[in-house]
């Protein structure tokens, strides 16, 4: 409930409020803290009982092993390439498609908009077998574009849905003014609509990127060659080692989380704007 | 050609790339799946044999299938309910202004940003039988605790808690966005009438949140029921995986461990049918408000 200005709070309720806030903070942050600390502990301390909450000794052993003895950077590169391909194509197709849905009148427009919402709710697991068989038929297994194509098909419907909401909120009069001033449609889109819809476009880009960055199922099914694996399935292989090296796994977790967090902090503002408009799948 | 008609053609042309992609990769698979469900087919070989409804009749008498439906339901109901409770509580906390509230807002969203694989690994480490910090901390409490957390009897609880941790920020953000649009006058009026904080929550906040909670409930319920990666990654590699073999995991195993593509397709169709049923019931029970603005 909103705290109203000028209302006096009792010390007991202040203490209670801070306890609750601290609880939320611990619940959200402790697992991440533990991942970071575990990746930096020396081996015998990592397996010590009772566990140490603040390590006595630090070392970068796990990171050295991750960088030099595993295919981590290859997995990283594959993930970035696939996620980037997905994001670019979804944005181009999504902006054009959403523009069409909001600015041109044609039959079936509302139906298409509703179908995109339906597709947004649609769980990918339902398409597992047919997409796998289709990809095999088209020679798209063990291929980064093939993997990107499946992510595009999952992301595009809700990209259309979010972008449509943003485009609808831009007054059509602004564009009409530009058209009267002699701009063509493409210019109106590029110089009037897109700048105003920028928060929505950025939010869409983030959501799309996250879908590709996080996916496990389709990478598992479509990619078999080690040199084409993405982070999700590549790092999962670390559990197949003769002795499970928890330090290594936590180091990989930190390395995968850091870019996502930096990215997230940088664009948080847009993210929340987009969340309000359509939400994020997952 | 009239201007109107030309405009319509351009509009459809611009939509074509998106429509083609969605058709090929969403609608076509659903149709193909319906057809495949009537066949016995090896996942890696080209041949297939028509078996009619055999896949479905086999499922009806397969106790593993019924068990997976029950486990998926249990998982979806428990984790969705707890996500909503945690999400609403978190949103109420973060709706206040206090020192560091922007920071805490960021932190509260982190779990959602972490790739699922990493979230599961971290929790497997947190509850590790020998070295886990959570069993250690709980062990210091004077209440009886299970000896190990990733066993047949307990792994479902770990799955649920881990899923709540990962996905409750989705609820939090949606509820927080809605809370910020509730007019403060409503609270002023309630306070003038002498309503306590609890009564304000029940009579002012909850009715305002009704719509957003209903849609969040639907989406999260569907996505939890069909979640594959979390139970798979948590249960895989241990003997206890069977205790969380939900319907999506069962489907994956049929398709890619036993290579029964036809059976896998039939299972996907069952999931689809169940979902359509739930969505239909949902929309009959809670008809959507008139808000479509397609002018």
Image (cartoon, coloured by chain):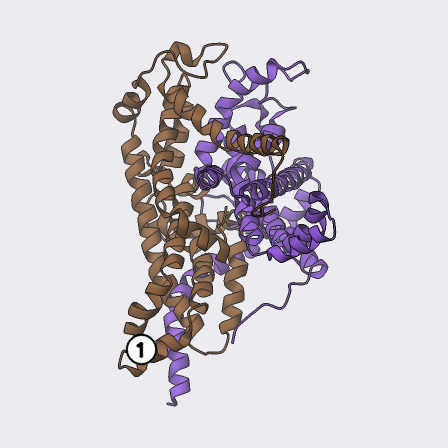
Chain colours: A brown, B purple
The residue most toward the bottom is B2
Quarter where residue B8 is shown: bottom left
The image shows residue A48, relative to residue B13, as above or below, that is: above
Q: Is residue B118 left or right of residue B226?
A: left
Q: Chain of mark 1?
A: A
Tell me, yes or no, if residue B19 can be seen here. yes
Q: Position of residue B180 (x, y in %)?
A: 55, 53
Q: Position of residue A250 (x, y in %)?
A: 40, 25
Q: Residues within 10 Å of mark 1 (few under 14, many from 20)?
A: some
Tell me, yes or no, if residue B23 can be seen here. no
Q: Is residue A267 left or right of residue B122?
A: left
Front residue of B71 and A60: A60
The image shows residue B163, relative to residue A169, as above or below, that is: above
The image shows residue B96, relative to residue B124, as above or below, that is: below
Q: Where, quadrant-wise, is the N terminus of chain B in this rendering?
A: bottom left
Q: Position of residue A195 (x, y in %)?
A: 33, 64
Seen at 50% across and 46% down, the residue is: A282
| Number of numbered callouts drawn | 1
Quarter where residue B163 is shown: top right
Residue highlighted by disc 1: A178
Front residue of B84 and A142: B84
Callout 1: SS: helix
Seen at 67% across and 38% down, the residue is: B74
Q: Position of residue A262 (x, y in %)?
A: 34, 39
Front residue of B37 and A182: A182
């Amino acid at each position: 409930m909103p705290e109203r200005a000028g209302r006096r709070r009792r010390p007991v309720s202040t203490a209670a409020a801070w306890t609750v806030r601290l609880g939320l903070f611990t619940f959200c942050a402790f697992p991440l803290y533990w991942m970071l600390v575990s990746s930096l502990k020396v081996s015998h301390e990592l397996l010590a009982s009772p566990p140490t909450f603040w390590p006595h000794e630090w070392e970068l052993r796990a990171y050295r092993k991750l960088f030099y003895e595993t295919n981590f950077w290859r997995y990283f590169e594959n993930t970035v390439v696939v996620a980037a391909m997905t994001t670019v194509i979804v944005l181009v197709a999504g902006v054009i498609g959403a523009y069409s849905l909001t600015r041109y009148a044609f039959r079936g427009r509302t139906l298409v908009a509703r179908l995109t919402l339906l597709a947004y709710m649609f769980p990918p697991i339902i398409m597992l077998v047919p997409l796998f068989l289709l990809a095999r038929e088209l020679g798209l297994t063990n291929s980064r574009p093939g993997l990107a194509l499946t992510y595009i098909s999952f992301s595009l419907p809700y990209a259309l849905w979010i972008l449509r909401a943003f485009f609808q909120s831009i007054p059509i009069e602004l564009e009409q003014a530009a058209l009267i001033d002699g701009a063509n449609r493409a210019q109106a889109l590029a110089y009037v609509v897109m700048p105003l819809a920028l928060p929505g476009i950025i939010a869409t880009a983030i959501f799309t990127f996250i879908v590709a960055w996080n996916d496990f199922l389709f990478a598992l099914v479509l990619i078999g060659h080690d040199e084409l694996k993405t982070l999700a399935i590549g790092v999962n292989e670390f559990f197949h080692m003769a002795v499970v090296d928890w330090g290594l796994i936590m180091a990989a977790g930190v390395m995968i989380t850091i870019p996502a967090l930096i990215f997230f902090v940088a664009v948080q503002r847009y993210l929340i704007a987009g969340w309000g408009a359509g939400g994020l799948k997952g | 050609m009239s201007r109107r008609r030309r405009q319509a053609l351009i509009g459809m042309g611009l939509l074509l790339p998106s429509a083609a992609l969605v058709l090929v990769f969403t609608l076509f698979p659903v149709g193909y799946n319906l057809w495949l469900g009537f066949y016995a087919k090896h996942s890696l070989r080209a041949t297939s044999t028509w078996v009619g409804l055999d896949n479905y009749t086999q499922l009806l008498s397969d106790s593993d299938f019924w068990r997976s439906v029950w486990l998926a339901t249990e998982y979806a109901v428990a984790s969705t309910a707890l996500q909503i409770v945690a999400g609403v509580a978190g949103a109420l906390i973060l709706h206040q202004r206090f020192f560091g509230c922007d920071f805490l807002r960021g932190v509260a969203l982190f779990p959602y940003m972490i790739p699922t694989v990493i979230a599961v690994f971290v929790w497997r480490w947190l509850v590790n039988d020998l070295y886990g910090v959570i069993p250690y901390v709980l062990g210091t409490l004077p209440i009886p605790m299970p000896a190990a957390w990733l066993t047949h009897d307990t792994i479902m609880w770990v799955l649920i808690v881990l899923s709540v941790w990962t996905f409750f920020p989705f609820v939090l953000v949606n509820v927080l966005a809605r809370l910020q649009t509730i007019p403060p006058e409503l609270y002023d009026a309630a306070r003038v009438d002498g309503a306590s904080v609890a009564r304000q929550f029940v009579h002012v906040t909850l009715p305002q949140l009704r719509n957003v909670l209903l849609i969040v409930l639907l989406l999260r319920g569907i996505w939890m029921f069909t979640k594959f990666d979390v139970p798979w990654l948590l249960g895989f590699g241990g003997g206890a995986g069977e205790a969380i073999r939900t319907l999506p995991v069962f489907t994956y195993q049929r398709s890619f461990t036993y290579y029964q593509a036809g059976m896998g397709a039939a299972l996907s169709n069952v999931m689809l049918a169940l979902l359509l049923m739930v969505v239909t019931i949902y929309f009959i029970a809670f008809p959507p408000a008139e808000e479509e603005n397609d002018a």
